[in-house]
Structures are given as structure tokens and as C-alpha cells.
Amino acid sequence: MVAIAQNLQAVRETIVAAAQAHGRAPGSVALLAVSKTFGPEAVLAAVRAGQRRFGENYLQEALDKMASVQAEMAGSLPGEVLEWHFIGPIQSNKTRQIAENFDWVHTVDRLKVAQRLSEQRPEHLPPLNVCIQVNISGEDSKSGVAPEACLALARAVACTPRLRLRGLMAIPAPADGLEQQRVPYRCLRELADRLRADGLELDTLSMGMSADMEAAIAEGATMVRVGTALFGRRVAAG
Ligand SMILES: *Cc1c(COP(=O)(O)O)cnc(C)c1O
């Protein structure tokens, strides 16, 4: 658990260095700690080291973990509030629990899912923050809306009453080297610029993971999603 605090410090330093190297304000890049496959004790170690935003991919695992973390924090860290982000593929029969339990969803890629999340977002909660996932590398196996279909989907999502469209998200095909890694992230940024020119108010580019944080930050990431560099290698599936 000492390692998690040290890793967190190292990742924060990487983010600041990348921001400075590419002319960005260091405070303009938020860190989402991706805790999938790790238990509540890993989340709590990160919380004690000052981390507040967590990303999860698997719904049931996430709900169990959130309950344990909340119970533990009620005793040891009263008053601290965490922000939970759903970043996994969404099955439409799971939208209710996602709408009820998360603050953000990064993986909206079809209107049916957006409409269900909006309808199912509880009245007592603020609108659900969402990003549209874009299949930026055009891979058959990846989820995400095709870039050419993104504007129409974004307009429709922006009209749902209980969602707040924040921006775009992508998981590009792995690439080696900073320049190659920057290419898909540049495409995502340019796509977001086109949506803004169309009148959509977007403030989020959710892009960059352990292996390509710098490339994403160079291209304008406002939120990097980092798992391995914080918690170590995942042994379970995913
Ligand atoms: C697992 C995952 C991450 C974190 O990846 P690392 O390479 O471990 O940093 C980021 N985003 C998504 C959508 C993920 O599923």
C-alpha cells in the first residue's frame, strides 16, 4: 500500500511534466484512478494518498467495492466524497444501476443507452456526466461510435434531460513512440473541436492510459485514466 502512494506521486509528477513539456497548465489534466480488479483496500490506500476520482469497468465488482469503501470511509475519513466513473462497456440491461450509482459514464456509444441512462437517473441526483466513446482507430472489435456518426449522437445526447454531455473518450489501438501515439488523440481532439464549432459545450477529453499518458496530454487530454501505473499489473481478466 506504500507502493500505491508512491505510484500516485510518480503519476502526478508525470502528468505535471507532460503538461509543462507541451504548453499545458498542469492543473488542466485530471487523474482518474482505474481500480478495476483491485479490492477496496487499494482504493482506500489511494484515497489516503489524496486521490478522489476512481474508474471502474465491471458493474457488480464496482458496486461491491463502492459499498466496502464507503463503509470504511464513514469511520476513518468522514466527510470525504469520492467521484465514481463508469468506463466499461455498457449492456442496456445494466443502465439503471449505472445511472443510480455513478457520477460519470465515459462509454456512451449509442442513443438507446443514453436515453435509458437519462430516464433512469434518480431525481435527487445531479445530471449524470457523460462522455461519448469514439472508435477513433476504426477497429472492428472496439466499442465506440464511428467518428462520422459522432456529431449526430452528441447532439441527441445533449438534448436528453438528465445527462450532461461533457466530452469525448477513446481507447486507441496500442502504438509505439510518442509521435505514433499522438495521432489518434489528435483526431479525437479535432473531432471535439468540430462538435464545439457546432455549438456543443464540451470541456472533457478523456484519453490517455498508463502507456500513453504523455501523448494524450500533448494532444489536450483533460482526464487521463490510469490503472497499471498506480495499482500494478492486473492478474484477473480485464
Ligand atoms: C483498464 C482501463 C484503463 C487503464 O489502463 P492502464 O493501461 O492499466 O492504465 C483506462 N481506460 C479504460 C477504458 C480501461 O478499461
Image (spheres, rainbow, N blue to C red):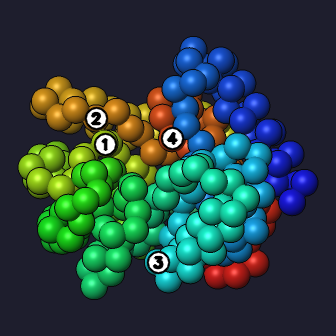
Callout 1–callout 2 Cβ contact below 8 Å = yes
The circle on residue 131 is: none
Q: Nearer the viewer, residue 168 or 189?
A: 168
Identify the image quadrant of the N terminus: bottom right
Q: CA distance from mark 4 to mark 2?
A: 13 Å
Q: CA distance from mark 4 to mark 1?
A: 11 Å
Which residue is pictured at 54% across the width and 51% down the height? 81
Considering only vertical position in the picture, is 177 above or below 53?
A: above
Q: Secondary structure at mark 4?
A: strand
The circle on residue 166 is: 1
Task: From the top left corner, tell me how far across and down residue 23 is, in percent.
Answer: 57, 14
Q: Secondary structure at mark 3?
A: helix
- The residue labelled by disc 2 is 202
Which residue is pictured at 62% across the width and 71% down the height? 71
Callout 1–callout 3 Cβ contact below 8 Å = no
Callout 4–callout 3 Cβ contact below 8 Å = no
Disc 1 marks a residue whose amino acid type is Arg
Q: Secondary structure at mark 2?
A: loop
The circle on residue 223 is: 4
The circle on residue 59 is: 3
